[in-house]
Image (cartoon, grey):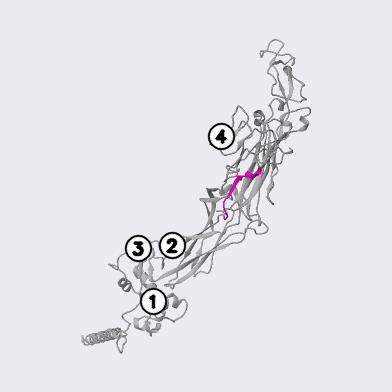
Amino acid sequence: HAPTQTLKTFEIMGNIGHAPSIIQSAAAPKNLPNLYVEAQTGKIYLAAGPVFSAPAGTTRCSPASACNGDLAMGGTVAGLSPGMYNAVIQLRQGNSTAPVEFMIKLVEEDLTMNQRMPVLFSDTPDLFYPSYNHLNHVAYLGFPMKPFTVSASSSSQAVTIGFTNGRLPQGAMLSTIQGGTSAMGYQCANSSHYCEESTTTVCNGTSTPGCNCLPSDNGKACSGPEGTACNGQGVCMACWNIDGCPTAQANMEFSWTPVTGQEGTAIVCFDAVQQRDLSLCAGSSSFECSLQTSPSHCINIEVLPDPAPMIWSTFEQDVDPYQNTGMAYLGRELRFTVYANDTNCGDMPVISMGDMPPGVSMTPQQSNVTDTPFTVTSYIGQTTTTQRACPTQMRVFSWKIPHTYGGYEAEHCFYATDSCGEDDHCSGGLHQVELCIEFKVAKCKYAVNLEQSIVEVASIFGSDWIHVWNLNELRSPDYILYRNQVLNIGRLYSVAVGDSVSKIARRMGTTEKSIMFLNYELGELDTTNITIGQELCIVANSCFGEVQSIWDENPVVDESLERWYAGVKSAYDALRQAKAEQLEAMKEVDSVVP
């Protein structure tokens, strides 16, 4: 997905001011002087104290003093007090600008506290901003995007963990939080080995007469309340006060099917929150007894219109893989594969075909999932190439070409039709793309099948093996033909002025029926209409054709066959007469023998 508009950039608004302003103070809100924003990603850094985490090459504050001095990216760093601060950056696109204003809460740094803060994460790799890839961050109108799960955990004891989130897109759904409540209870602590006979009597781990020494009860559950006695002079303690409670993890799933009107970019942000049950916090100032929130993490979702499917085939390489003529041949099955795919992996195009000649078939549709590199560009110009595993649909086309289809030429189309989405409003839109292919069947050519002989090929077209042998470069009629060998089965004749099918048939010693059989445009269309320059496949017969050419004044039909037949008949009659006379003579001889 390439951006259709000018690239967006982020920048600090210099005209807001330079002095920090704590909200609710008398001073007017002004921009923080310690902000740094990455122009392309919008990621913001804030120098607020002795620790300054910024991109490589920027100046850090001195760890021994307040954060003062000049930063490499510009601006003067001043020491800041805890409180709420106003921050404004500017979003620029072309000649248009828009301010983006937000609040920053600055608190004193407490490394111990940081270790007990809730942590927000996800098992989905590269989910949170600024990561961007097709798998996690692109959705299509009308189709559910790939759900993702956000998780939260904490090292704090006896707390309930949950989530807060920013504004969700209309129709987005969050699942019920799974988990999040840590086990709470009481455990024995500070217990020593004790005598079984007297549980308040401690021992050194070795049994003696009158004292069966048992291990301490440290870590064992006790009924509470806190401060009650355990065996071995131990004390029953709340597990959260001795770091003995199992920690918890919370999980929540986000799902969304964007619909018409939601094209563009959606930003979804989450925080992990934790707090101990207030019933456990009576009189306690424990850190966990106040609501604690993790840093926010956001997911950038690019919502695109549902694309039309793509369709292609292997026709060009499969129509004639032996001679690459681009022609189909009588005798050889035309076979190729039609494929369809969709950039939207949730869509499955259906392959169909339009009007086809007789003998055509297609296999049932099948899917083949392959990893395909796909380049996407976010709304702020982030470009990344990721692998996507979208199912490619395929159907195999085959055509057993009838022997009467020599010279057939026609365009036939295949279609890939996708679905319009899974919402009630068909937000994805119904698309149909076509692939049209020009079918051409060679005229006066035949591709030999397995174990076919020259005699069999000739008989298909009402000819004889001598005629086929003469038309092809065959050194011997006894040579074995090989599969897919292309043979000439006749000659091409160009229609001249004054020609008709009947005249051509009479001249070539053939029949109108034979000519129509060999030429699709005549036989299959049941017509004898021909045009000057039209090429016709003719199987001529010299025994019946005209002797003279058209340039002779009075061409006559060749009577050689009739003369041959008359001669044969005369010889046969003479032979029969001689045979009869011989038999009659033998009868006379028999009658005079005594």
Work out how far the residue at label 1 is from the one at label 3, CA to CA, in angstroms. 28 Å
The earlier-in-sequence mark between 3 and 2 is 2
Q: Which mark is residue 59?
A: 4
Work out how far the residue at label 3 is from the one at label 4, CA to CA, in angstroms. 81 Å
Examine the rendered structure and indicate whether residue 66 appears above or below residue 530.
Answer: above
**Residue 541's quadrant in the figure?**
bottom left
Where the C terminus falls, by quadrant? bottom left
Mark 1 residue crowding within 10 angstroms, few (<14) / some (14–19) / many (20+) = some
What residue does disc 2 label?
316
| Apparent side of residue 131 relative to residue 520 in the rendered image (left or right) | right
Mark 3 residue crowding within 10 angstroms, few (<14) / some (14–19) / many (20+) = some
The earlier-in-sequence mark between 2 and 1 is 2
Amino acid type, callout 1: Glu
Magenta residue check for 7: yes
Work out how far the residue at label 3 is from the one at label 2, CA to CA, in angstroms. 23 Å
Work out how far the residue at label 2 is from the one at label 1, CA to CA, in angstroms. 25 Å
The earlier-in-sequence mark between 3 and 4 is 4
Q: Which mark is residue 535?
A: 1
Res. 289 visible in picture: yes
The foreground one among 199 and 319 is 319
Tag 2 secondary structure:
helix
Q: Position of residue 449 (x, y in %)?
A: 39, 65
Numbered range of the magenta stretch:
4-16
Q: Position of residue 146 (x, y in %)?
A: 61, 48
The earlier-in-sequence mark between 4 and 2 is 4
Examine the rendered structure and indicate whether residue 135 appears above or below residue 582.
Answer: above
Amino acid type, callout 3: Tyr
Q: Which mark is residue 482?
A: 3
| Apparent side of residue 548 relative to residue 359 in the rendered image (left or right) | left
Work out how far the residue at label 4 is from the one at label 2, CA to CA, in angstroms. 63 Å
Magenta residue check for 335: no
| Apparent side of residue 469 relative to residue 342 in the rendered image (left or right) | left
